[in-house]
Amino acid sequence: MNQTSPPSKEHLLKLLVHYLMGAGSGLPQFRTQTHLGIFNPRLNTAYRVAIDDVPKDVIETVRCDIIGSGKI
């Protein structure tokens, strides 16, 4: 990641994949998570997106086509 720019869509996709895999694992820490975020310490900037703001069709596409797990 360029150290002076916001996260790219590829970075956000990777973060979403990791979140969905964690949420599908049944671990309790994922039950209360409401946002995905990246912190850039060089810029002292946090980038956040609410999970509810991610379109449902995007989540289903990532689950089915990238993770390969179908509906969780």
Image (tube, grey):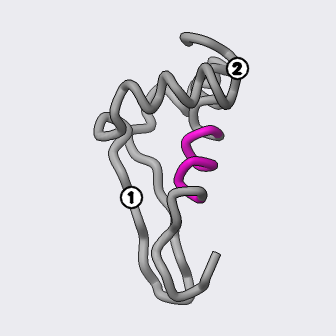
Q: Amino acid at mark 2?
A: Gly
Report helix, strand or loop for mark 1: strand
Q: Could you tell me what secondary structure mostly forms the magenta stretch? A: helix
Q: Which residues are the magenta region?
A: 11-17
Point out the image quarter for the C terminus.
top right
Question: Residue 31, position in %: x, y?
Answer: 48, 26
- Residue 13 covered by magenta stretch: yes
Residue 12 shows which numbered tag? none
Q: Which residue is mark 2?
A: 68
Residue at 31 percent across and 34 percent down: it is: 52
Tell me which label, 2 or 1, sits earlier in the chain: 1
In this view, the residue farthest toward the top is: 71
Report helix, strand or loop for mark 2: loop
Q: Which residue is mark 1?
A: 48
| Displayed quadrant of residue 19 | top right
Question: Residue 7, position in %: x, y?
Answer: 51, 68
Residue at 36 percent across and 51 percent down: it is: 49
